[in-house]
Image: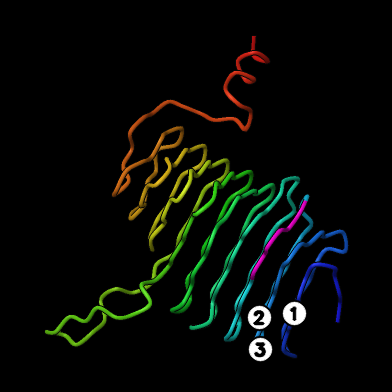
Amino acid sequence: MMSFNGLDLRVDEGNFIEIDADCNFQTSRIYIQGTGNKVKISKALLHQTLFINISGNDKEIVVSESKKNINNLKIVSIRGECQKVLIGRDFSCGGCEIQMNDGYETLTIGDDCLFSWGIKMRTSDGHSVIDLETGNAINLPKNITIGSHVWVGEDVKFLKGSIIPCNTIVGGFSVVTKAFFSENSVIAGFPAKVVKSNVGWDRQMPYEYNRVKS
């Protein structure tokens, strides 16, 4: 089995894992139990405190190549089957926890997304809410989709069914509970709503951006 400094890798037989030879890890762990699971980790400037914990079968996790640091990314899927986490190119974050614990959900993050720290994403509730007339659970899991070039502020929570369009800002401490479709907007609040339109964003600091622009 492959070996990387800074990475504790424990993978059951019957799974597929691909890690770019140029990956740079610090205090990271990848644990995979079950069969038919696929994990692909491409190089970043640094993967710091990456934690992936999979139990079950036929799950897929892809972290694409990034020119940025990916810090404190935690992906946990210890129940259910066939879940997917697909993270696009040039993703960066200070801290993001993804929980997928039901079945068949997909969580997608587009290219060039900037995540702050304290971000949590959940595609399911983890336990059942039951309609007493039908006897059925009514809180089924739902996908989460984040478009490309999305900036997410500190301590944002994304609940199941969240959709964030491309070229969007999600304000700090927001709780996103539904789908949004208007690009070039600011989404914020508890629960989140569109609070500003016709805006974009850039990774440069504001004074620096204006100085370069002028």
Q: Quick check: marks 2 and 1 in contact, CB under 8 Å?
A: yes
Say what amino acid the circle numbered 2 marks: Asn
Q: Nearer the viewer, residue 24 or 158?
A: 24
The residue under label 2 is 37
Q: Out of 199 and 53, give the one closest to the viewer.
A: 53
The residue under label 3 is: 35
Position in image of residue 66 (x %, y %) = 73, 49
Q: Residue at x 64, y 20 (%)?
A: 208
Q: Position of residue 13 (x, y in %)?
A: 75, 90
User: Who's the residue at 72% across and 46% down the image?
Assistant: 68
Looking at the image, the residue that sits furthest to the left is 133
Count neighbours of disc 3 (C-alpha within 10 A) and say few if under 14, some if 14 to 19, many if 20 or more.
Answer: some
> Label 1 belongs to which residue?
16
Quadrant location, the C terminus: top right
Residues 114 and 180: in front is 114
User: Which amino acid type is marked by label 3?
Assistant: Thr
Left or right of 167? Residue 30 is: right
Rendered position, 205 above or below 56: above
Q: CA distance from mark 1 to mark 3?
A: 9 Å
Relative vertical location of residue 60 with respect to residue 171 in this rendering, above or below: below
Instruction: Say what secondary structure mark 3 lies in.
Output: loop
Report if the CB atoms under discs 3 and 2 are less than 8 Å apart: yes
- Residue type at mark 1: give it: Phe
Residue 188 point in image, percent of width and height:
36, 41
Residue 116, label in figure = none
For label 1, the crowd category at 10 Å Cα-Cα, with few meaning under 14, some 14 to 19 and many 20 or more, is some
Magenta residue span: 46-51
